Amino acid sequence: MIVRVKLYANLDEYLPDGSSRNQADMDFADGTTAAAALARLGLPPEVCHLVLVNGVFLAPSERAANVLEDGDHLAVWPPVAGG
């Protein structure tokens, strides 16, 4: 199944080589969860502050149970600080 992965700020370095800007269409096995997709990208859990699937917030406690579907959009932001 194909899932569009968008990684924001400095997280784009975790995308596969040849990715366009901050996103990539990636092939995952059926039954892949959001947590498994993030782990496959090598993203440490502590840098995945805000995770959305199809624009809906996914709490850290829900990521291991949320099964992705073909055509989903998975977006991730790191913790952000500012003043």
Image (cartoon, rainbow, N blue to C red):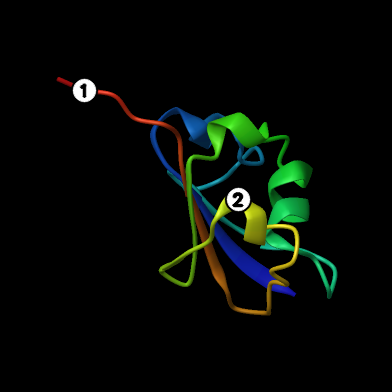
Which quadrant, please, contains the N terminus? bottom right
On the picture, is 6 further left or further right than 44?
Answer: left
| Gap between marks 1 and 2 measured at Cα | 23 Å
Please tell me in which quadrant of the rendered image residue 72 appears.
Answer: bottom right
Label 2 sits on a secondary structure element that is: helix
Please tell me in which quadrant of the rendered image residue 79 appears.
Answer: top left
Mark 1 touching mark 2, by CB under 8 A?
A: no
Residue at screen point 63% across, 67% down: 3
Per the image, the residue denoted by label 2 is 60
In the rendered image, residue 71, in percent from the top left (x then y), is placed at: 59, 78
Which quadrant, please, contains the C terminus? top left
Residue closest to the far bottom: 70
Q: Which mark is residue 23?
A: none
Residue closest to the far left: 83
Q: Give, as a three-letter code, the residue at label 2.
A: Pro
In the rendered image, residue 39, in percent from the top left (x then y), is placed at: 76, 43
Residue at screen point 78% across, 53% down: 36
Q: How many labels does the image show?
A: 2
Q: Give, as a three-letter code, the residue at label 1.
A: Gly
> Label 1: few (<14), some or many (≥20) within 10 Å?
few
Per the image, the residue denoted by label 1 is 82
In the rendered image, residue 44, in percent from the top left (x then y), is placed at: 67, 31
Q: Choose between 1 and 52: the one closer to the eye.
A: 52
Residue closest to the far front: 61
Please tell me in which quadrant of the rendered image residue 29 appears.
Answer: bottom right
Q: Choose between 49 and 31: the one closer to the eye.
A: 49
Q: Choose between 42 and 22: the one closer to the eye.
A: 42
Judged by depth in the image, the label closer to the viewer, 1 or 2, is 2
Label 1 sits on a secondary structure element that is: loop
In the rendered image, residue 50, in percent from the top left (x then y), is placed at: 45, 47
